[in-house]
Image (cartoon, helix red, strand yellow):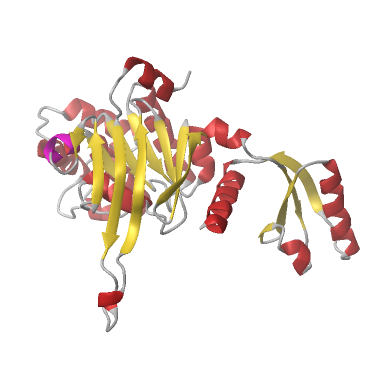
Amino acid sequence: MSLSAVAKIDGSMPAISFQSVCKDYPSPSGPQSASRPPLRALDGVSFDIQEGEFFGLLGPNGAGKTTLISVLAGLTRATGGRVLVQGSDVQTDYAAARRKLGIVPQELVFDPFFNVREALRIQSGYFGVKNNDDWIDELLSSLGLTDKADANMRQLSGGMKRRVLVAQALVHKPPVIVLDEPTAGVDVELRQTLWQFVAKLNRQGSTVLLTTHYLEEAEALCSRIAMLKTGRVVALASTSELLKGASSNILRFKIDSELPMALAQKARITGRIVQFPAQNALEIEQYLAAVREAGLEAHDVEIRKADLEDVFLDVMNTAGAQA
């Protein structure tokens, strides 16, 4: 049984509730600006995230993901609608809502005047948490920062600064963790360390909201996913349901020359790698025959199941066609 189903049965309060959230920005200035409508970054976004979920928020650049996180964090005021964190309104009950959140931002923001341990103690004190050294030590150990505890923040690499941001977000033991592109531009070791630790916290009951462009991470970690495009929710389902909804397998191979335009328009091409959605064996053979007829040779041919990236592209294309 899904977490959302359990929540409906026992009536428990959602960890996060987005209720018809809208956000408008003024139109760019100019001689005709008075007649231009405002730019709508969020257009009636509504969904709940239940206690204990590992939830993914996906979308292309400009879809509204970071704006929605900013509204949740209280950094941006919504034009309309409400956002609740375990029942606390992020606007009218900001202090209570903020204490329940641990947010890892996209940007590497740090204070250059303190070492790592001092930064964590200060962040802990900001939330009124005293005598927190045992938890700070556990965070340092779990995130591979123990040997950097006395290092000044300016001396750390970008990946190490990212680890400190994660530790700062978790230092007051928030029940709801928000990760906004936490592994953007970091190495494989940090990704593995971070996901092992966050998955452990999720198993212990923490709710996690993740935004990421690494769709393999979302597929592996998230039990449920919402997809945004132009400020609207265009898909909301469990990860397994989204994958089951994929209607085709994927024919994948490499070529050394460009495909003819008629074929290229049906394919997803990344460098030498070509991928075609294929409903059945007949379609697979037709694509391969067309490649041969074009005088090209397919290398490393394989057939795989559609993954979350395939589903994501299909949803975005469908949403674009309906817009």
Is 317 left, or right, of 265 in this rendering? left
Q: Quadrant of residue 89?
A: top left
> Residue at 39% of width from left, 28% of height from top?
53
| Residue farthest to the front, as pictured | 35
Q: Quadrant of residue 73?
A: top left
How many numbered marks, from 0 up?
A: 0
> Residue at 71% of width from left, 42% of height from top?
248
**Magenta stretch encompasses residue 126:** no
Is 314 left, or right, of 99 in this rendering? right
Q: Percent from the top left, x then y, of residue 93?
A: 13, 38
**In front of the other: 113 or 251:** 251
What's the magenta region? 93-97
**In front of the other: 16 or 9:** 9
**In front of the other: 152 or 216:** 216
**In front of the other: 265 or 230:** 230
Q: Is residue 23 above or below residue 72?
A: below
> Residue at 34% of width from left, 53% of height from top?
42
Q: Percent from the top left, x then y, of residue 108?
A: 29, 54
Is 316 left, or right, of 293 in this rendering? left
Residue 161 visible in the shown view: no
> Residue at 27% of width from left, 63% of height from top?
25
